[in-house]
Amino acid sequence: MSAGDAPRRALPGFLAAFQFPDFRRLWTGAFVSSIGSWTQDVALAWLIHTRMGEPFFLGLRAFAAEFPLLAFMLVGGAVADRVDRRKILLTSQFLQMTFAATLAILYGLDRLGIGAILIIAFLTGLAQSQSAPTYQAVLTSIVPPAHIPNAVALNSLQFNLSRAIGPAIAGLLLAGAGTGICFSVNALSFVAVIVAIWSLRLPPPPQAAGASGTTLSQSVGAGLAHVRQSPELFGLTMLALVGSFLAFPLITYLPVLAGDVLKTGSAGYSLLLSSFGGGSIVGAVLTAQRGKVPGRGRLMLFMFAAFALAAGLALSFTWQPLVMAFLFLAGGALVTAFSTLNSLVQELAPADLRGRVLSAFGLAFRGGGPLGGLVAGALVGRLGMRPVLGVYCALLGLTALGLLRRSRRLAGL
């Protein structure tokens, strides 16, 4: 960490990582950009649900956005350990801003069909496949090791704050200005994170000095081998895959819950998503406050089980306020589980392999959700959303409780 990044003041509790200027700048820029992304995401999901009327398209869009991460994130992690991380992040943000602007233009010209939506989702995912592991590696390189759990939890906080704020903005914009303005808002929001990244003072990649003697494929192989040979990292990575596969489709199919089950329209959908995001905020704050304490593995597994219960109850009722209350609890439990899991992976990853270890973890974490959504989408049209996602919740709960009882290695982290 450079001398310019030395803390100017000590902050208590869950705000501890904010004492480092580079972290503050990156957090703020990412927060503004995430608000724009959630605003666009809500508008796009509602557009697909109302204009195209096919639940499978919701899962297909999520899969199109995440498939490049399945294919290229491991390469992105290796690149993050070898190449100037600022250049990777800036290039990715400029591309994503362009794609959001393209959505706005196509919508304004009345040329935005499912084909264009899927292509833009794929290209956006391709850009993120390079930036996602790089961003995670940068996040933990601009704070001291003792602050990594707090930094990870605060990063989760900004993501979930934006998940609460973005849908509320989308609801207002959809009602007052239409769908296209949501895409324009997202394009503009990238300016904040671009400025933040430009101002960072980053250390060189750990492998920069000796990377010339190692091929990219060898770098990827070394990262995968390390994850495979570490029982803790392998177990956490597999848990990320299973957890995201079974948990994230709930968020993907909230438009169906609001539109077809609760009959509350776009306003009801934004309220459901904001309720989930509000609970996530509480979970992120408590996780940041908790910091690096014993027993986090047990807490993580317990929170996966708690999410499964709360989400299952949310799917069981048709009164919107009660559904919102259970989604609030589900959001808090899920962000606690995944923030804890993420911080454990960050702490266990060696500095010279961090980009590649995080890319393997990110591949599981980001890949499981769209795969789960795609499978659910194939079943929702025939069996209904609530029975399908109810089975998902039951499987996640049983998995978490089984690991809590039988896996001393994970529970003891």
Image: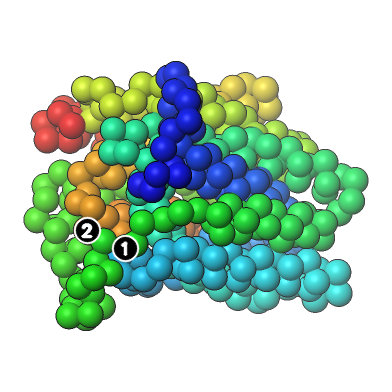
Helix, strand or loop for disc 2: helix
Colouring mode (rainbow / by chain / secondary structure / one colour): rainbow
Which of the 4 image quadrants contains residue 357? bottom left
Q: Percent from the top left, x then y, of residue 205? A: 31, 63
Q: Percent from the top left, x then y, of residue 355? A: 30, 59
Identify the amino acid type marked 1: Pro
Label placed on residue 130: none
Q: Residue at x 16, y 67 (%)?
A: 222
Label placed on residue 352: 2
Asked if one can make out residue 251 in the rendered structure from this viewpoint, the answer is no
Residue corresponding to mark 1: 205
Asked if one can make out residue 241 in the rendered structure from this viewpoint, the answer is yes
The mark nearer the N terminus, 2 or 1, is 1
Number of marks drawn: 2
Q: Percent from the top left, x then y, of residue 32? A: 65, 46
**Which residue is outermost to the front?**
3
Helix, strand or loop for disc 1: loop
Q: Distance between the residues labelled 2 and 1?
A: 8 Å
Identify the amino acid type marked 2: Asp
Q: Which residue is drawn at 43% across and 33% down?
A: 7
**Callout 2 touching callout 1 (CB < 8 Å):** no
Query: Is 297 left or right of 20, judged from the image as shown?
Result: left
Q: Which residue is drawn at 19% across and 51% down?
A: 350
Q: Percent from the top left, x then y, of residue 266? A: 76, 43
Local packing at callout 1 (Cα closer than 10 Å; few below 14, some 14-19, many 20+) is many
Q: In this view, does 33 lie above or below 149?
A: below
